[in-house]
Each structure stands twice: as structure tokens, then as C-alpha cells.
Image (cartoon, rainbow, N blue to C red):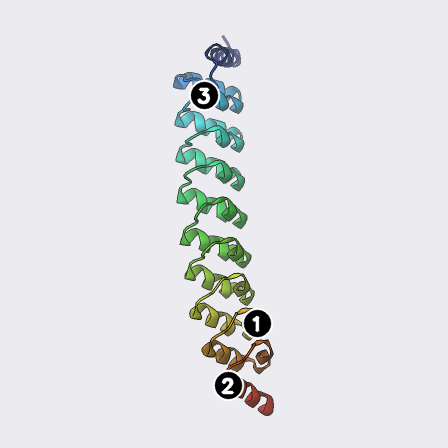
């Protein structure tokens, strides 16, 4: 019997088994799994607990196959995400390697990762500082990495600490306009760079005002 005919028969037997059992999937040995999935990746939907080889064959045919595998093997996860970062949406208990691979392809994958750790956050922000607004409670390192790209990143941060604030105004004095109640130290650091930013500071500290005045008078 030719291979394609055998595969068709096997798939027919799978469907028949499902119909008789009333189940949504059935168990089958490895050889049958492989033969069925080689015929069509869609048959992964019918296989209960597909083995690693079967998972990989299905995912290599079409990354969408990962959606129908309850606990995909690490290799299958990587193969799916390598083809499309969107695949991470369907993977529960994603390992870090898979998460990084998704982010490397597109920083928007961050939105499909629950509780990304510092390394994942940094990878996303290093690709685009705009991703800082997608991160709940970003780490200090992530905040600083975003600021390094653009001082505008600080406007997406809730209560950045003094080091992050200083990094932003040292990057560009205009960052002070995005900081609520900047400390005297931050005000002074900003005005030292550009006295014109005094106009962005509500209720500026006396030290910052004096520094701005000196700048205006001297024209520095």
C-alpha cells in the first residue's frame, strides 16, 4: 500500500475512533501519529498527548498547529515562534528562550508575555523605547535603557525615581516638563543644561530660578 494511501487510511481510522468514542481526541502510538500528521498538520487536533516528533512535524508544516497542542515541547515552541512571533500567544508556560526569540522578531510580542522579567523587558525596550508604556512596573534598568534612547520615555513612567529623572534631564533638559514635582536636584540639573526649561517647572525652587536668571542675564 502506498504511503499516502496508508496515511489516508490511518486518518480515517482516527476519525472513526473519535466518532465511536465520542471524544474530541484519542490516544495512538507514535507511528500512527507521525503518519497522520505527515498527511495533514490539522490532525494534531485529533491526537491526545502527541509525542515530541509529532508536535515538531505539525509545527514545521504550519505554526498554527501549536494552538492545538496542550503542553508543547520546548523544540516545538521554538519552531513555531521562529516562524511567527504570534505563535507565543498560544503557548502556556513559555520558557525564557521562546520569549526572547519572539521579542527579537518583534517587540510587540511583549504584549503576549505575562509578567516579563528584566531581560525580556530590556530586549523589548532596546528595540523601541515606546515599549516602556506596555510594561507594568518596569525595572530601573529597563527605565534607564528607555531613557538612553529618548528622553520622551519618561512621560510613560509612573513615579520614576531620582536616578531615572536625572538621567532623563541629563539626556535632554526638556524632559523636566514630563516630571511631576521634580526635586530641587532635578530642577537644577535641567536648568544647568538649558535655562529656558525653567518655563516648564511649576513652582520652581529658588536655586533653579536663580540659576535660570544668571543664564538669562549672561546669555549662556
* Residue for badge 2: 206
Which of the two labelled residues, at mark 3 and mark 2, occupies the earlier sequence position? 3
Q: Nearer the viewer, mark 1 or mark 3?
A: 1
Q: Tell whether label 2 touches label 1 (CB within 8 Å).
A: no
Please state the horizontal and vertical placement of residue 53, each as a whole percent of the image. Answer: 41, 26
> Residue 199 sits in which quadrant?
bottom right
Q: Position of residue 104 (x, y in %)?
A: 49, 48
Residue at 48%, 14% in the rendered image: 22
Identify the residue position indicated by label 3 in the image.
Answer: 47
In primary-sequence order, the first of circles 1 and 3 is 3
Q: Where is mark 1, residue-wise?
A: 177
Quick one: 141 or 29, which is closer to the camera?
A: 141
Q: Crowding at label 3, few (<14), some or many (≥20) Cα neighbours within 10 Å?
A: many
Q: Nearer the viewer, residue 95 or 39?
A: 95
Does residue 51 sit above or below 195 in this rendering?
A: above
**183 up-or-down from 78: above or below:** below
Furthest residue toward bottom: 217
Residue 209 position in % (x across, y down): 54, 85
Q: Nearer the viewer, mark 1 or mark 2?
A: 2
Distance in Å between CA atoms under marks 3 and 2? 73 Å
Front position among marks 3 and 2: 2
Q: Residue at x 54, y 73 (%)?
A: 176
Q: Earlier in the sequence, mark 1 or mark 2?
A: 1
Q: Is residue 48 above or below residue 153?
A: above
Amino acid at each position: 500500500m502506498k504511503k499516502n494511501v496508508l496515511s489516508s487510511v490511518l486518518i480515517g481510522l482516527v476519525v472513526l475512533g473519535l466518532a465511536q468514542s465520542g471524544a474530541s481526541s484519542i490516544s495512538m502510538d507514535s507511528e500512527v501519529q507521525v503518519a497522520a500528521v505527515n498527511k495533514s498538520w490539522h490532525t494534531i487536533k485529533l491526537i491526545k498527548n502527541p509525542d515530541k516528533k509529532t508536535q515538531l512535524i505539525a509545527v514545521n508544516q504550519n505554526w498554527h498547529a501549536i494552538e492545538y497542542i496542550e503542553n508543547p515541547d520546548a523544540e516545538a515552541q521554538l519552531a513555531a515562534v521562529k516562524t511567527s512571533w504570534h505563535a507565543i500567544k498560544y503557548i502556556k508556560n513559555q520558557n525564557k528562550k521562546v520569549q526572547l526569540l519572539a521579542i527579537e522578531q518583534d517587540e510587540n510580542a511583549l504584549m503576549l508575555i505575562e509578567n516579563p522579567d528584566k531581560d525580556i523587558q530590556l530586549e523589548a525596550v532596546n528595540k523601541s523605547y515606546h515599549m516602556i508604556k506596555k510594561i507594568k512596573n518596569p525595572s530601573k534598568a529597563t527605565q534607564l535603557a528607555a531613557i538612553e534612547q529618548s528622553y520622551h520615555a519618561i512621560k510613560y513612567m509612573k513615579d520614576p525615581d531620582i536616578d531615572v529623572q536625572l538621567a532623563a534631564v541629563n539626556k535632554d533638559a526638556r524632559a523636566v516638563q514630563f516630571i511631576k514635582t521634580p526635586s530641587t536636584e532635578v530642577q537644577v540639573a535641567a536648568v544647568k543644561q538649558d535655562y529656558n526649561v525653567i518655563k516648564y517647572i511649576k513652582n520652581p525652587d529658588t536655586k533653579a530660578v536663580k540659576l535660570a536668571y544668571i543664564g538669562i542675564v549672561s546669555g549662556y
